[in-house]
Image: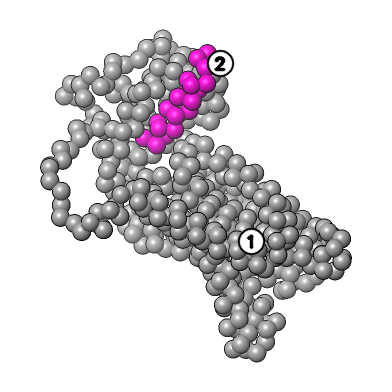
Amino acid sequence: MSESTPQFLPSPPVARFGGRPLRRRGRELWRRRGVRGGALVVALTVCGAVILALVRDQTGTEGFLVGLALAVLPVPALMAVFRWLDRVDPGPWRNLFFAFAWGSCAAALVAIIANSFATEWLATATADPSGAQSLGATAIAPVIEESAKGTAVLLLFLFRRRHFTGVVDGVVFAGFTATGFAFTENILYLGNAFGEDRTLGGGAGLASFTVATFFVRIVLSPFAHPLFTVLTGIGFGLSTVARGRHGRLLRVALPLAGLFGAMGMHALWNSSSGVFPPFGFYLVYGLFMVPVFGLVTWVTIWARQRDLRTVSAVLPAYVAAGWFGPAAPYALSSMRARTAARDFAGRTYGATAARAVAEHGRHATALAMLRHQAEQGVSVPDFAARERELLHRIWERREPAGAALLHAARATGRVPVPPPYLDHWAPNPYREL
C-alpha cells in the first residue's frame, strides 16, 4: 500500500531467529498444547468418574438412572440460551465444553467432598447435627460451591484471554459452568427423592418427593445456579473494560465483588425456607430471584448491544483501508441484518456460503473488539499477529460476504438510500503486504 496507509493495518510478522532455548525436556513437553489439553481432559474425566460413582453410591443404581434422565432435560435449553447470548462474537465450543465439564465434574466433586467434610466437622464440634446441616447449607455450601464454579471463569479469563473480551463472555462462561454443576447436583437430589419414594411407597415408583423435586429444581428454578455464578462472570467481564486511574484495583475488586454477590444470593436462596417459613421459598423466588434474573438479562443484552455499537464504530477504518465493503459496518452492527445476510447467502449460493458469511461476521466482530481494546489502552501482547490472522480469515470469505452484507444492509434499512459506491469493493489490500 502507499505511505498513507493507516497505522492500524497489520505489521509484517516478526522474524524468528533459529536455535532453541535451553529448557528441560519436561517443561518443553508441557508447553505443547496437545499435552496440556490431554492432561486436562484426563483430569476432568477422572473427576467425572469419581463424582458419578459418589452420586450413584448415595442414590443407588435405580435412583441414579432416574436422576440422570430427569436432570438432563433442562441442559440443552440452558446451553442454547447462553449460546444465543453469545451470537455477536461466539467463541470456540471447546471453551464452553471446558466450562460445562468443569462445573459438572471438578466443581461438583470439590463441592460434595468439601461440604460433607465441613458439615461433619461442624456436627462434631457443636454436637448439634441438625444445626450443622442448616449452617452448612446456608453459610458453607454457597462459599465452597461458588468458589469452585468461579474457578472455571478465572481459568478462562487467565488462559483464554483473547476470547474473554467483555460482560457477555463472562456471562456465557459462567452460565455453562453453572449449568454443568446444576446437572450433577440435580442427579443427586432427584435420585435421592426417587429413593425416598421407593422406600415410602413400597416400590410404587415415582411419587410425591420425585415430582416435587423435579418441579422445584427443573421446572421452577433451572436458572438458579446459573444466575448465582453469572454474577461472578459479570465481575470478570467488567474487569476487562476497567480503565483509568483505578483500573488495576478495579480489575481485582470487580471479580471479587461478583463472587461475593454470587455467594450472598446463593446463601439467601438456600436459607429461604428456613428463615421465612412457611412460604419463604416463594417469597424469595418472587421478590428477589425473578427481579435479579430480569436485571441480569437486561445487563447482558445491553452489553451485547454495546458490542454491536463497537463494531459499527471500529469497522469504518478498515473499510477505508479496503478490507471490507462499505456496507459491512451497517450490516454487521445488527443481528437482524446478519441473519438476513446469512439467509441470502444460503438461498443464493448454498450452505457453504451461508457458513462463510457467518464466519466472516464472527471474525469481523473479533477484529473490532481487538482494535477497541487496543484503542482503550488494554495491553494485547500478540495484537499484530492476531489482527493479521483475523484479516486473513476475513479476506478469504470476502466474496460471498460482500454481496450478502450489501443485500442485508439494504433489505433491513441499515442504509436508507444505498449509494452507488456500495456496489464496489476497494482494491485487494494484500497486494502490498
Q: Is residue 416 above or below residue 15?
A: above
Q: Quick one: which residue is furthest to the front in this view?
A: 61
Q: Is residue 78 above or below residue 336?
A: below
Identify the residue at horizontal 63%, vertical 84% (top origin). 123
Q: Quick one: which residue is furthest to the left in this view?
A: 18
Q: Is residue 143 above or below residue 36?
A: below
Q: Secondary structure at mark 1?
A: helix
Label 1 and label 2: CA atoms lie apart by 44 Å
How many other residues sit within 10 Å of disc 2, few (<14), some (14-19) or many (≥20)? few
Which amino acid type corresponds to the residue marked 1 in the rendered image? Glu
Foreground residue among 432 and 238: 432
Q: Is residue 120 left or right of residue 408?
A: right
Q: Is residue 364 magenta?
A: yes
Closer to viewer: mark 1 or mark 2 = 1
Q: Is residue 151 left or right of residue 111?
A: left
Which amino acid type corresponds to the residue marked 2 in the rendered image? Arg
CB contact under 8 Å: marks 1 and 2: no
Which region is colored magenta?
347-367
> Which residue is denoted by mark 1 in the rendering?
185
